[in-house]
Image: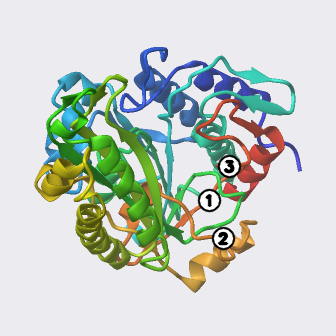
Amino acid sequence: MSALFTGRHRELLLDLLRLPSVNPLEAGPEDPPSRLPDALERYAAAAARAGLRTVRLAAPRASCLDRPDVPATVRAAARDPRFLAGQPSLLLRLGPERPRADTVLFNVHLDTVAGHTPPVFDGARFTGRGAVDAKGPAVALLAGLEAAASHPAVGRDVTVLLQAVAGEEGGALGTYGTRPLLEAGHHGRLNVFCEPTGLRALPRATAAMTARITVAGEDAVDDRPDAGHNATVLLGFLAQHLAARLDGAVPGTRVCVAGLHTGRIHNRVHGTGTLLLNLSYRRTRDGAALETAVDGQLADGLRRFGELFGSTREFARTARDAARITRLGWDKRGLPALDNHDPWAEALLARAGARPPADDPGFTCDAVWAAGLDGAFTAVLGPGSLAANRAHAPGEFVDLADLEDFADVVR
């Protein structure tokens, strides 16, 4: 069989990799401004070669953020109208609008994490931000659809939808990209979310919530450390306590003790600070159980801190006031997790060349918003690996051979 990922696709991928599309929630001072709208326009032009017609290319409405499961960071960023204006999503369709039973959806995101670098292609490997997550899979998807479009049933008996979205990275979790499109009914009997899975068809995607523990006490000078509240000691204790008590507290969940910040000045007791926990779960009900566990273990940690430090000279005030000055908030919570099964759809994916999922618990991505769709099956499927291909890290890459294999599965 001739190659599906042709020289034209290689040039398209390099073009997309050159265009910075860092999610604004990720962008650092060294990242160039996002050109995501330009990337989506070029992607739509290339998709037209396969007969895919642009149904919608537009920024989301601000009203899509008016709900409690939208991360606080997204709501804060959207106070600037330029945020959503620069984060459009694209909906393409091959064939007329049909019932969902005769429709297949592919979803892929073109926003990236921070760290944009000029791309390199050495004849066998693409290197650059977004190479595997997920601009490489996006172009391989087009290559596969172009080949599939030569079959008379594609577009005639079966309609193909393609969502190329913003808002997957930066903790936005599809709340202004994928979710509004799915809730508007743009999905199919089979829905494939293109993420690096090593060509394993994962029928699950974890969801995540972020807890923010804040200490709001009073500073003190270093000569009188007992006069203030020591947020560093308190949050450091809570970080260790929660790490130990939440590890395995709810089976099937993972706890990432993330950033802890109080201050950088050495001759001061810092009375304020924050501790972040990122908590992922495979089943929606497990997320609720983990949220309850965080509440209970934080209260227990504050009690234990009071017992341990209440009789000390330097930290007695912190111990006495710990519960009063400590607050638990949630940057995001209440998101669904995907865990679905369908023998017909799973057999179809296997015949197409997708590998079985084994016991892989999956990872967090936009596919969570497909949880609970009636009469539908959703899988996460794509080339490469988040870890092995250095997604979200310097030197992100994808091999041409893996893109070719994914294009063939799509075909």
Residue type, numbered disc 3: Ala
Residue closest to the eye, 187 or 243: 243
| Residue at screen point 26% across, 44% down | 314
Mark 1 or mark 2: whose residue is earlier in sequence: 2
| Residue at screen point 35% across, 76% down | 374
**In this rendering, is residue 316 above or below 343?**
above
Residue type, numbered disc 1: Leu
Alpha carbons under labels 3 and 1: distance apart: 15 Å
Residue highlighted by disc 2: 349
Which numbered disc, 3 or 2, marks the residue closer to the eye?
3
Mark 3 or mark 1: whose residue is earlier in sequence: 1
Residue highlighted by disc 1: 381
Q: Callout 2: few (<14), some (14-19), or many (20+) C-alpha neighbours within 10 Å? A: many
Q: Secondary structure at mark 2?
A: helix
**In this rendering, is residue 192 above or below 262?**
below
Q: Callout 3: few (<14), some (14-19), or many (20+) C-alpha neighbours within 10 Å? A: few
Q: Do labels 3 and 2 touch, CB within 8 Å?
A: no
Mark 3 or mark 2: whose residue is earlier in sequence: 2
Q: Position of residue 113 (x, y in %)?
A: 50, 34
